[in-house]
Image (cartoon, helix red, strand yellow):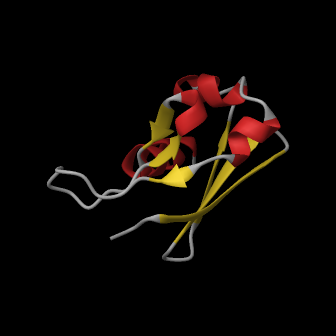
Amino acid sequence: MVRATNVRFAGGMLYVTLNDGRQVGLPLRKTKWLKWLAHATPRQRKRWTIEPLGDASDEVRPLYWNELDDGIEICHLLSAQSLAE
């Protein structure tokens, strides 16, 4: 199961480190579905969690920003990264 181990923001980018050693980076302002995160404060961006497994059949643990009431599924992050390459 691929899951996030760390999240960081630098130079207008979102970087997610995965447990398999990969690092996925996406531009916040150029990625339409990340606009909500682009407009968040640095404090809000730092307050992310990895959601526990739910009832879904896959083993995806999304990243979630409780204060912003939104999150990112790793499968979407990986799909967007492959489109950007």
Q: The N terminus lies in which quarter of the figure?
A: bottom left
* Residue at far front of view: 67
Left or right of 42: which side holds 25?
Answer: left
Residue at 45 percent across and 51 percent down: it is: 78
Image position, residue 71 (x, y; %): 48, 38
Vertically, is 19 above or below 14? below
Q: In which quarter of the image is residue 45?
A: top right
Residue 48 pos. (x, y %): 60, 48
Q: In this view, does 51 lie to the left or right of 43?
A: left
Tell how many labels: 0
Identity of the residue drawn at 56% across and 23% down: 32
Query: Which one is nearer the viewer's eye here, 19 or 52?
Result: 52
| In the foreground, 7 or 49 | 49
Q: Which of 34 and 26 is in front in this view?
A: 34
Of all residues, the one furthest to the right in this rendering is 11
Q: In x, y percent, where is residue 61? A: 37, 56
What residue is shown at x 41% (from left), y 50% (from top)?
Answer: 62
Please indicate whether residue 15 sits to the left or right of residue 19 in the image.
right
Residue 66 percent location from the top left of the image:
53, 37
Q: Residue at x 85, y 43 (%)?
A: 11
Q: In this view, does 85 lie above or below 68?
A: below
